[in-house]
Image (cartoon, grey):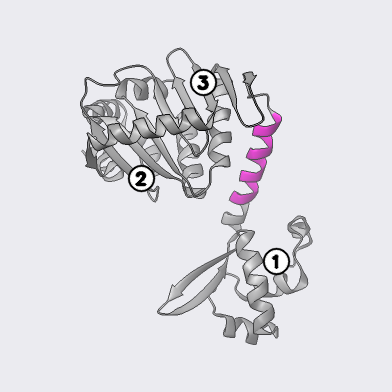
Amino acid sequence: MNWSDTSLKILSLTKTEIAILNVINDVSKNVQDISLGSKISRTGINHALKYLMKKGLVNCSLIGKRRVYTSVDLVQLTKKFQQVLDQIEISRKDTRGAKIKISKEDEFIIHVGLKEIIPAFKRIAFENKNERVRGIQHHRSWKELINKITPQQLIEFNQTIKDNKIIIDGILNKSAYISYKKEIQKDPQKHTEAIKSLEGRMADYTIFPDEFFKHDAEMWIFKTTTLIINWKEEIAIEITNKNMTGFLKDMFEFVKKSGSKVNHNETVRKLLEV
């Protein structure tokens, strides 16, 4: 792609940054090669690369011991623009529900209906990049969820998880995979793309005995926020409170220690193969 295109003025790129991007356009090069191709000093290139990587326009990788750099392609750039538009749309909509604010940092929000819950979930995910997100979900809650949202919405959520480099630290009940298998066998085509969207998603899953948490509700604990959702009744409680979130994190870790590890992505993928 042509990084000098006037349509990309919105990126506020400097002449140096544009020159570098055009040199590493779809081709991985080290700093020395970039300098030869752009006639820019290595010091200037290192300085510009730092900001280009912060903007998400350049990817860095290792070939042996040498660092090489590649600009994002058109598809990746388009996806980044779409993420910005999604964030604007989420901010624009009134998805904050009924709010109880008790201090500058602490608040409790009640979300009623899918039109509030789904955007709230997306908003919180956007706000938590490079974080470990803890979740407890019984298959009863999962069955309610897949009847409430479309496969495309699930795919979009998984993509957000991957783009924001979020690690899912999940806890499921033992019979969850039996439930997943039954649902997939009803309509494999419906679930194929959603399962494929798990590829590349960082996940750490544990299973617990079926007799616990057997409710139509689930809990997601982010860095400073907790979201408790009842998909059947379409109601969620968003908690932004340091003490409560800390308490729930401790409870999560206690439950996790009692369970057993499972490779979630691989297990679900095998269900589709069956």
Mark 3 vs mark 2: give the one in front: 3
In this orientation, does residue 121 appear? yes
The picture quadrant where one finds residue 70 is bottom right
Q: Which residue is mark 1?
A: 3
Disc 1 packing (10 Å; few <14; some 14–19; many ≥20):
some
- In this rendering, the answer to whether 119 lies above or below 131 is above
The quadrant in which the N terminus is found is bottom right
Q: Which residue is mark 3?
A: 237
- In this rendering, the answer to whether 33 lies above or below 222 is below
Which numbered disc covers residue 203?
2
Give, as a three-letter code, the residue at label 1: Trp
Disc on the earlier residue, 1 or 2: 1
- In this rendering, the answer to whether 92 lies above or below 203 is above
Is residue 91 within the magenta segment? Answer: yes
Is residue 33 within the magenta segment? Answer: no
Measured in 3D between alpha carbons, the distance from the residue under mark 1 to the one under mark 2, in whole angstroms, is 35 Å
Please report the bounds of the magenta region as a residue range: 79-92
Measured in 3D between alpha carbons, the distance from the residue under mark 3 to the one under mark 2, in whole angstroms, is 24 Å
- Secondary structure mostly seen in magenta is helix
Local secondary structure at mark 2? strand
In this orientation, does residue 57 appear? no
The picture quadrant where one finds residue 264 is top left
Mark 1 vs mark 2: give the one in front: 2
Mark 3 vs mark 1: give the one in front: 3
Disc 2 packing (10 Å; few <14; some 14–19; many ≥20):
some
Q: Is residue 33 left or right of residue 213?
A: right
Measured in 3D between alpha carbons, the distance from the residue under mark 3 to the one under mark 1, in whole angstroms, is 45 Å
Give, as a three-letter code, the residue at label 2: Ala
Residue occupying the point 61% across, 50% down: 80
Residue occupying the point 39% across, 41% down: 168
